[in-house]
Image (cartoon, coloured by chain):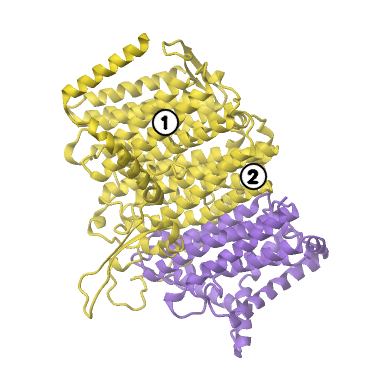
Chain colours: A purple, B yellow
Amino acid sequence: MSGYAGLLAALVLAPLLPGVINRTKSFFAGRRGPPLLQPYFDLAKLLRKGAVYSTTTTWLFRAGPVVGLAAMLVAAALAPFGGVSAPLAFAGDFLFFAGLLGVARFATMLAALDTGSSFEGMGASREAQFAALAEPAFLLGLTAVAWKTGGLSLSGMLGTTSFATWSGAAAPLALVCVSLLVVFLAENARIPVDDPNTHLELTMIHEVMVLDHGGPDLALIQYAAALKLWVLGSLVVGIALPVRSLAHGWAFAASVAGMLALCVVVGVVESCLARLRLTRVPQLLLGAGVLSLLALFIGLK
Amino acid sequence: MTLLLVALGLLVAGGAAALLCRQSPRAANLLGAGSAAAACALGLVPAVTGLVGGGARLESAWSVPGGSLALAIDPLSAFFLVPLFGLCGLAAVYGAGYLSAAPGGRSPGPPWFHFSWLVAGMVVVVTARNAVLFLVAWEVMSLASYFLVTRDDEREDVREAGWTYLVATHFGNACLIALFALLGPRSLDFADFGPASHAGLLFVLALIGFGTKAGFMPLHVWLPEAHPAAPSHVSAVMSGVMIKMGIYGLLRTLTWLGPPPLWWGGLLIAAGAASGVVAVMFALAQRDLKRVLAYSSVENTSIIALGLGVGLVGLHAGTPGVAVLGLAGALLHVWTHALGKGLLFLGAGAVLHATGTRDLDRLGGLARRMPLTSATFLVGAAAIAGLPPLSGFFSEFLILYGAVQHAGLHSLAAMVALALMSGLAAAVFVRAFGGAFLGVARDDGVRVAHDPGAAMRAPMAILAPALLALGLSTPVLLPALAPVVEQIGGLPARRELDAATAPLAVVVLGSTIFLALVALIAGLRRSLLAGRTVGAAATWDCGYAHPAPRMQYTASSFAQPLTALFGPVLRTRLTWDAPRGLFPAAAAFATRTPDVVREAALRPLFDLVSGALHAMHRLQHGRLHLYVISIALTLVVLLLWRLS
């Protein structure tokens, strides 16, 4: 099974993840909840719609979702899945991965500012702040794994964790896992950093940035968000699950199961925790950075 | 070499001709810009041939003691000459448009004279092979840029900026004179410099002397003052290439000092990390667009310092892979920043030219009014923020890739700093671009802005694609840097650079796929929307009935969460007249973030010095006969001392 199977799984299964999260949350709330495949239905519906654009906006507003999705697609080609190398694996690819996330964020923030709306400005401002603090945690966490495993590519350091690597370096790997989980929640605009279900523009981050987008543009944004959930999630799962010890088919199945389990975890977190006050979020992200740094110190020669 | 001399002659002669041509400002403008642009085009030829291996040397005896009049082009010189001639040529073209529209009908002769001498001075700095010649050229460069900075000397802030610059640059010069005096007690020819016994002291002197020009904190104080004060094409040259002369000097010094001990790399990394992180915070807090860019320049020279530091640490550790990657990343960032920051300053100049303001909180909505300026500024901003597929990403990639391979405390510090800086730099440039170009104009004057004339548009239209091309050609370009890296590091670099091209080639492949996907998805989106109803409406604002442009989120509001987080460092000052009563009438709110080094350290220090020197003020009483007597007395004392 080649790396393309993982890429294909990302492209096809990514919208399933928000569905799983929502079902978990409805279970905890005692509701029946939307169907698991609701995100697919939403995408299909949005793609069939027209659009309305603000008269303030320029080409940058239309480019935002396009660039965001393109960046996320290339990022998906870098992330290993199911214990096999990614199609575009190379030494240092995690830096390119971080760069692509940066491009997507840059385009989204500019599209938000293009509307001239204060709400979207607020969203972009918060996104800029939290992303700037999440980036060191992310890069340092992956560097810690690189130093522990000796691999310089995502495929070399994540898809290959086995029972042996875990027993040899449990402490730094666990620290990185927690740190990356925080980054995963922050980057994907989940509780405790952002609440995707709030109804108040004033309190949102990611959702408010895309407030003015509709129709196919919104479909692109939602699909890109689902892909981001998958891609960043696959990094966390890749470290946590020692799939290298399994046969290929089983490793793949275990990774898919791991992704679904991660979504259940996100759903549980969202059901049990309140969103943090905005001024507290930097502390959480800096905490994640410190965990990554700690993992690095353990790995220092 | 002949072409280089012709270019130098053309610069000097053209500048003088522009100065003398007082009757016709139009002719002076054309003469100054034309000769500078032509000289730069000529100079590019020896620069490029020098880079691909065709070095040249010119030597002749002169009456100055301590060596000969020597000029040479080697790979290191050529590497700095290419962006020098490239950017200065484009800036000259831009300046022709910028100065022709100068208010008040002032003659463009003097600025062209100083511009030509600035370029000539930098060319000689890079090619000089004798310390005296180098220092003279360095001083010419510093003075010429001083006169350019103080062009609008009727404004007090400009005079103060010029004063700060003059003091800072001569503080640096003093260190350089000490450096060269220690390097060559006997001969001042570069060829005779070699490993010295007190190399550590020399390294620190070079770091301070050249670091003042490069703008490492806390020696950067002149940069955020001088860059905004200068005409924009001069800001582009100063930030794009002149501050790189500091980097050049540091690299040239490293070639003489022998194998670096660990603490040199550590010092560079510490200086780069502290300077870069603090500078990017200050960039976030500035309202003046050109001040934002100036602080970002400090951040970018710090990235270069981090790359050099990683390189030196790698050299010490005996890991050529790390050393070569760090040095190559630093070198590549020199080019990236020259093109990118040059472009951004030209864009900022176009904005200033069109709107008359640099205040981000007054601008807005220019993307509609100035399509070319906004598109090119966006490319420059993304490149300097280190986003793929532009060249800024590739240089930062090389440095980080080198640092990751060196599992040590030094490289860890460099990585933490770079990771923090890249996220904050993205915030800086989203804020700067968003504040100036997006949303709706916040001020009446901004609403009538338009793109500048062809002479100012063309350089921006050339620089923006160049940043993409430089990024995508990195795998091809990198092996060509081998001679430069070898000269600095004193180790064979070809094999390591060839090895580094493999991951870079995949980055380029990924970037190409990314660009293709952007085109594909854009086409898909267009075809989906074709034939459907596409409406236009006002921006959604929660049902509020009368939104006004002033209600938009400003650049200051955008940065507030981050500036509040970094408040202890930034010490932003608020002027706040809060609304009072049930029907508040006037209210005002403003923030100002002066430089913390300038305010907390240098201002008290200079107050102290001027207070101490006040006692000597009594000597300056204006009575001429007493002056004459004191001169005569001094001469008599000297004579007696000589005779005894």
From the viewer's perspective, is B531 left or right of A223? left
Residue toward you, A169 or B551: A169
As drawn, A199 above or below A285:
below
- The kind of secondary structure element at disc 1 is helix
Going by the numbered disc 2, the residue's amino acid type is: Gly
Outermost residue on the bottom side: it is A30
Residue drawn at the location 33% of the way across and 38% of the way down = B94
Mark 2 / mark 1, whichever is N-terminal: 1
Residue drawn at the location 35% of the way across and 21% of the way down = B10
- The C terminus of chain B, quarter of image: top left
Residue bearing the label numbered 1: B173
Count the labels in the image: 2
As drawn, B115 above or below A84:
above
Q: Position of residue B1 (x, y in %)?
A: 47, 18
From the viewer's perspective, is B335 left or right of B351? right
As drawn, B157 above or below B439:
above
Q: Which mark is residue B395?
A: none
Outermost residue on the front side: it is B644
Residue bearing the label numbered 2: B402
Instruction: Kindly tell me whether residue B376 is visible in this rendering.
Output: no
Residue toward you, B302 or B472: B302
The quarter of the displayed image where residue B498 is located: top right
**Chain under callout 1:** B
Do the CB atoms of the residues marked 2 and 1 lie less than 8 Å apart? Answer: no
Residue toward you, A91 or A287: A287
Q: Position of residue B643 (x, y in %)?
A: 36, 8
Q: Position of residue B505 (x, y in %)?
A: 63, 44
Residue toward you, B324 or A120: B324
Q: Position of residue B445 (x, y in %)?
A: 23, 56
- The kind of secondary structure element at disc 2 is helix
